[in-house]
Amino acid sequence: MQVIGLCRFSYPATGGFRLNRDTIEEQRQFLYAPDRLEERFRLFEAITLPGFRTQTDETFELFVLTGTCLPQIHADRLRDLTAGIKQIRIIAKKPGDHKQIVREVLNTARADPHQPCLQFRHDDDDAVSVDFIERLRAAVVENTGLMQQSESVGIDFNQGYIARREAHGIRAARVYRSLLGVGLGMHVQAGSTRTIFDRLHNRLARFMPVVSYPDTPMWVRMLHDFNDSDHARKDTSELSPFTPEQAEDLRVRFSIDPDAFEARYAAR
């Protein structure tokens, strides 16, 4: 079964984000502000890419959606960072209606619309575990009847880490969060044009069945000043330094070395 993911990298759309601006030009100025864009690149390189580079199931495609107006120096940097990951495809689109563009990207990516597919969404500052794709496929097998009966079914891995880089290093907490957006997939039935972006991720269960897996950490969500989500920017969860066990979990399950991450971050 084809597995398709979509990650928006500072794509200037109308709609689709909480921090929208009145015009595309204002949106571009916000997205491409030097401090913000540098922060996104740091997290994309150190947090997002390692897990996709080392997936236990390598048969998937991750489309990174960016704007044709992304300055060339940043477009080149994005291509250089992803060049060694064969599953990543960079798609540059003119600014437009968010819902229309993401539907077009995902449905065009389907090799055969008459066959079912798996889709997932991802943000450019978060991570998924190295077995994320493998677990998505397993969920389809484990819930075959439900998948066959429903036009679409959400697959929600609701345990993970929230983390923030602070002056003295990364601080984190292991949490349960349902329909967070990261670690969220969707099975789409053959012939359907539904996509995982058709509905707000936190409301997905209002429109389709959702299967939840709370058994093990499957994602890392980074908190910082540039989060699109109000909840993430204002998150007051108590965070602590990684314990040795959690640090090992980060290395094994997400291919992220906390020490290397901090050294890379401090060097910039």
Image (cartoon, grey):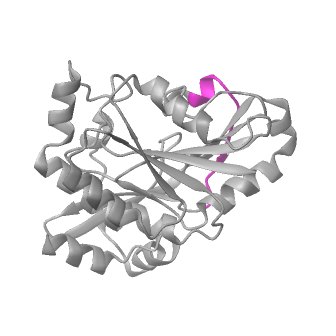
Q: Which one is nearer the viewer's eye here, 41 or 250?
A: 41
Residue ID at (32%, 57%): 78
Q: Decide: is 151 above or below 184.
A: above
Residue 187 pos. (x, y %): 70, 40
Q: Is residue 206 magenta?
A: yes
Q: Decide: is 33 above or below 79.
A: above
Q: Quadrant of residue 212?
A: top right
Position of residue 121 in the picture relative to residue 111 (left or right): left
Residue 65 pos. (x, y %): 41, 43
Q: Is residue 97 magenta?
A: no
Residue 84 pos. (x, y %): 45, 71
Q: Which residues are magenta?
A: 204-215
Q: Which one is nearer the viewer's eye here, 132 or 215?
A: 132
Residue 29 pos. (x, y %): 14, 35
Position of residue 131 in the picture relative to residue 24 (left or right): right
Does residue 39 show up?
A: yes
Does residue 197 show up?
A: no
Q: Residue furthest right?
A: 145
Q: Quadrant of residue 208?
A: top right
Q: Residue furthest top?
A: 22
Q: Which one is nearer the viewer's eye here, 210 or 111?
A: 111
Position of residue 17 in the picture relative to residue 120 (left or right): left
Residue ID at (28%, 52%): 75
